[in-house]
Image (cartoon, rainbow, N blue to C red):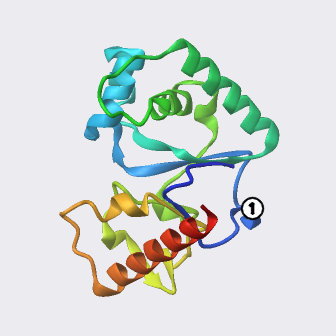
Amino acid sequence: MITDTRDVFFQKDPFKNHFLKKINFFIEDKKIQECKHNSRWIKKLYGKKILKKLGDKYISCSGTTIGYRNEMLMYLKCMIRHIERYKYFSFSNSPGTDQGNHNNIVYLTKFNKYKKYSNSDGYIATLANSDIKNFKLKNKLKNNKNIAYDIIHQYDRFFKKNNQNYSLEVKRYFSNLIKKLSLQTKVIS
């Protein structure tokens, strides 16, 4: 498993999930062309033609990828080749371009045949571009099919959006989660 660390919370052990395939990619609820950051990364890395090809695809988040050892090694080798070959320098406070490389690989290489899970599938909730109405909360964050997510990703960015109507229950859940994670981080440091 490849995962971000700062904004990831485990609700269950993802390796006990028997539905996962040889390699699994997780999709956000927004298309690449609807996101200025993802669009910019792809355009600067690969050019306008590739951005046009990828624009109507949903963002695949590079922050969480799970798979079998051999497939993950193939994916990582492909990522390394793309990162070394396609790069650009930015003066802005950009967190990196791996997301642009990842989306090119997921949609335009041999990896396009592998499974892509949306938030509604219930394995990983990638929240930054999501609508609160697509989730349920009862002790754990769940999808509309009442399946608890293995992993919650981007929970901190979820609350930075002003257009969300959060229930008090959801606010409390994530506030407590963030407090717990902050305390654990301080103890570890």
Q: Is residue 46 above or below residue 97?
A: above
Q: Nearer the viewer, residue 181 or 135?
A: 181
Is residue 144 in sight in this rendering? no
Q: In this view, which residue lies farthest toward the right?
A: 70
Quarter of the figure with the C terminus: bottom right
Q: Is residue 165 left or right of residue 185?
A: left
Q: Nearer the viewer, residue 188 or 86?
A: 188
Residue at x-position 42% and y-position 63%: 155
Q: Position of residue 95 (x, y in %)?
A: 41, 37
The residue at which mark 1 appears reads as: 15
Q: Is residue 29 left or right of residue 22?
A: left
Q: Dividing the picture into quarters, in which one does residue 170 lie?
A: bottom left
Q: Position of residue 82 (x, y in %)?
A: 57, 20
Is residue 90 in sight in this rendering? yes
Residue at x-position 39% and y-position 29%: 54
Q: Dividing the picture into quarters, in which one does residue 44 lie?
A: top left
Query: SS of the residue at dot 1?
Result: helix
Residue at x-position 37% and y-position 69%: 134
Q: Position of residue 117 (x, y in %)?
A: 54, 53
Q: Position of residue 81 (x, y in %)?
A: 63, 18
